[in-house]
Amino acid sequence: MNNYKFVSHNESETMHFAYNLASKSKIGDVIVLTGELGSGKTKFTEGFLKYFNLDEEITSPTFTIVNEYKKTNITIYHFDVYRLEDVDEFYAIGGEEYFSNGICIIEWGELIEEALPHDYIKISFEKDNSDENVRILNVQAFGNKKLPVIW
């Protein structure tokens, strides 16, 4: 398993980190975002979508479970699985079928861990108690996934 820690001092740095990761991402990539409310998951997603010029379209998928963002040659699926009762609900919506059809960003993905593909990246967001703007992003690659060099 590959590990990396990135310290973001503000929302712009979080978005830039995500933008750089997006530049190395491809269809079939799954990125799981974990962390408490307000820890930067949505800003990360905004930065990720910015790479594809889709950042103006971002909305929270909290009530729809998944939002689709389409470009000519790629689709990005943005999941928020916080409201799911259990992993069976994810299977019921055909969630695992999205994995090979585009890039998937899954907020609260730890709630459906057993449904995740073998290879994925997990980013855990932590707030820094000494500075309200600082976020610590712990990045891990699972399975045969390798972390791209973006930092």
Image (cartoon, grey):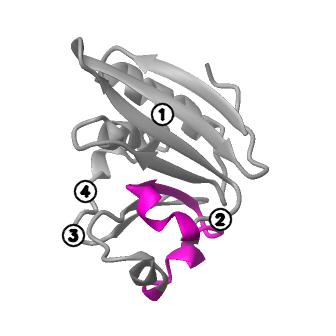
Left/right placement of residue 82 relative to residue 148 reads left
As displayed, is residue 41 above or below residue 31? above
As displayed, is residue 102 above or below residue 35? below
The residue identified by callout 4 is 60
Q: Is label 4 in contact with label 2 (beta carbons under 8 Å)?
A: no
Viewer-proximal residue, 138 or 11? 138
Residue at left offset 61%, top offset 38%: 140
Secondary structure beneath label 3: loop
Q: x, y (%) of residue 111?
A: 41, 63
Q: Quadrant of residue 86?
A: bottom left
In the picture, the quarter occupied by the C terminus is top right
Q: Is label 1 in contact with label 2 (beta carbons under 8 Å)?
A: no
The residue identified by callout 1 is 18
Mark 4 or mark 1: whose residue is earlier in sequence = 1
The residue identified by callout 3 is 63
Residue at left offset 23%, top offset 44%: 37
Mark 3 or mark 1: whose residue is earlier in sequence = 1
Secondary structure beneath label 4: loop
Q: Is label 4 in contact with label 3 (beta carbons under 8 Å)?
A: yes
As displayed, is residue 142 above or below residue 137? below
Mark 4 or mark 2: whose residue is earlier in sequence = 4
Looking at the rendered structure, the kind of residue marked 1 is Ala
Range of the magenta residues? 92-114
As displayed, is residue 141 above or below residue 78? above
